[in-house]
Image: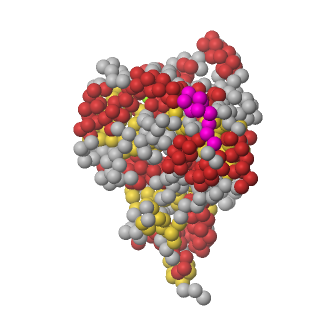
Amino acid sequence: MSKTIRLTMAQALTRFLSRQMTEIDGKTVPIFGGVWAIFGHGNVAGIGEALYQVRQELPTFRAHNEQAMAHAAIAYGKANFRRRFMAATSSIGPGALNMVTAAALAHVNRLPVLFLPGDVFANRIPDPVLQQAEDFSDGTATVNDCFRPVSRYFDRITRPEQIIPALSRAMAVLTDPAECGPVTLSLCQDVQAEAYDYPESFFAERVWHQRRPRPDRGELAAAAAALKGAKKPLIIAGGGVLYSQASDELAKFVEGAGIPVCETQGGKSSLPDNHPLNMAAVGVTGTSAANRLAEEADVVLAIGTRLQDFTTGSWALFKNSGKTIVGLNVQPFDAGKHRALPLVADAAEGLAELGAALGGWKAPSAWTDNSAAGKKAWQVDASKVTASTNAAFPSDAQVIGAVQRSMGSGVILLNASGGLPGELHKLWQAGAPGSYHGEYGFSTMGYEIAGGLGAKMAKPDREVVVMVGDGSYLMMNSEIATSVMLGLKLTIVVLDNRGYGCINRLQMATGGANFNNLLKDSRHEILPDIDFAAHATSLGAIAEKVPSIAGLENALQKAKTNDRTTVLVIDTDPLVSTDAGGHWWDVAVPEVSARPQVNAARKAYDEKRQMQSVGD
Ligand SMILES: Cc1ncc(C[n+]2csc(CCOP(=O)(O)OP(=O)(O)O)c2C)c(N)n1
Ligand SMILES: [Mg+2]
């Protein structure tokens, strides 16, 4: 018999988590950066007591909203390129369900996070316990079943020894580059407190390393043959390039073969914006430099991307009907999308072997030179829209210009929803890998501030600049107080256009009346005039409303020396967005309507849909 130790299930869980390590830059560090927790009756006595036991090795952080703390945990994993991650624990019922949206965010973005929601009593004696929902037809269903479709691995722990295989499976998913995503271990609250004689070997320190699968020989040969036949090759770099930390390999590959690169939201900063072959953003929020190449490309090497509709312009962007897509992806589900030739591998390994297999082959120089000309033209357009202005209500692009001029490309620029992701994807000039942190897989309003906090925890030496709209700020701002409490400084720029500006523009573009988006167009007795600076001040931040673009630039300079989270608010124009670049995407317009504007929009929509390739 191996030696055992008598612990509660929760004590075994936290002890196990505290012993999981990884290696970063040659140093062994805990793989869990900590646990976010809001306690309630479903976790305070069990997990709460167990977290206290390990508070030195596995720090616990208190937040104000479960969804927000989960956002922080997820952003931590993203900013660490998935090498380190966090857990988030909640009480049962509302606390648990508050994390479901965040679980979906992590699921869509393929980001590692461990959810530990409390659950009902496994022994069912107190049923229905406080906050328990009762299913009339299924005694095993609890609200935590809502995590199932948004978790890569879900388990409900109804006996203390079940935590042993469950944690092994959790670690397998969290550390696997192909499977990576949220894991939910739903912890019945009585079982958290039950003791068991756990084998001591279960708690041995373990060091995890990033797996880097190499390509299959046949797939590699087919991919190399496709590229060698290309006249107009193009690379799409997705988030997988960053998670593989393959930027150097990508630069080497494209410099060798002369292939231009464009970036998805998730892949932005794969190459620095000023790399001559980086055409920057592609797709619906793409640059003209990238999109004109995408329209003509005959071989598209899609690396580490999900090829979602903002990248493909709802499959209307790639107009070359004879094109071949090569899907270099660690996950076969993505590698073979849209009839791509799959090249299942880690991005860095795949690029290295593909580069060798090309044996010095280069793209036709006319194509490479043409890309450089397109980039120059785009830069002229971009500098016009981001230039300074005296306008009382500047555009988002002009605010972006001010932030870029003041903060440079070395910060971590974080955003998620509203009009900003599109403008930033096009216009932000990213620096080193990871200097652009966009959550556009799920584009969750409310990610920004909490996500900024997680990114700052991952990279405490970097300035984290959060750009957020008034709508998203109002949806979730509570972790400003947490950032102040933890001494983790964020610089937050709030663009107040008095409503849901981007959805209002989308409504207008689909023929709709201005309705229920901007505050002025929404049912009201009193038109709100929200003092965001006063609000942020009340949470402990240093805050200021700035009167102009020049005022913003001054305030950003001052903010650099502030010792705590700083919130700068600027009024902006809700109706303006950048015309240059971009591409159509599929937003279904009503087929019949009493509004002639809708009918006209439907006609235009039907025409645009002709561009979509079906079955591609
Ligand atoms: C949680 C959530 N609810 C709704 C949406 C749909 N949505 C996307 S952007 C947006 C408006 C965002 O408003 P704001 O933050 O002020 O940015 P703006 O559009 O004005 O730039 C809405 C409602 C979303 N992405 N996330
Ligand atoms: Mg707004």
Q: How many marks?
A: 0
Quadrant of image for the C terminus: top right
Which residue sits at x=27%, y=42%? Answer: 560
Quarter of the image that includes the N terminus = bottom right
- Whole-percent x and y of residue 290? 55, 31
Answer yes or no: is residue 443 visible.
no
Q: Give the magenta-colored segment's residue range.
A: 361-370
Residue at the extreme bottom of the image, as rendered: 1
Residue 482 lies, in percent from the top left, at: 35, 50
In percent of width and height, residue 84 lies at 48, 59
> Is 332 on the left or on the right of 264, as rendered?
right
Q: Quadrant of residue 364?
A: top right
Query: Would you say residue 58 is visible in this rendering?
Result: yes
Examine the structure image and report whether residue 366 is included in the region drawn in magenta: yes
Q: Tell me which residue sits at (62%, 36%) in the image.
A: 363
Compared across the picture, whether 323 is left or right of 360 comes to right
In the figure, 200 relative to 415: above or below?
below
Say whether residue 312 is magenta.
no
The residue lying at 48 percent from left, 23 percent from top is 377
Residue 130: % across, % down: 52, 58
Residue placed furthest toward the top: 596
User: Which one is in front, 562 or 413?
Assistant: 413
Q: Main secondary structure of the magenta part?
A: helix
- Relative depth, front residue between 476 and 385: 385
Render colour scheme: secondary structure
Residue at position x 68%, y 41% in the image: 228
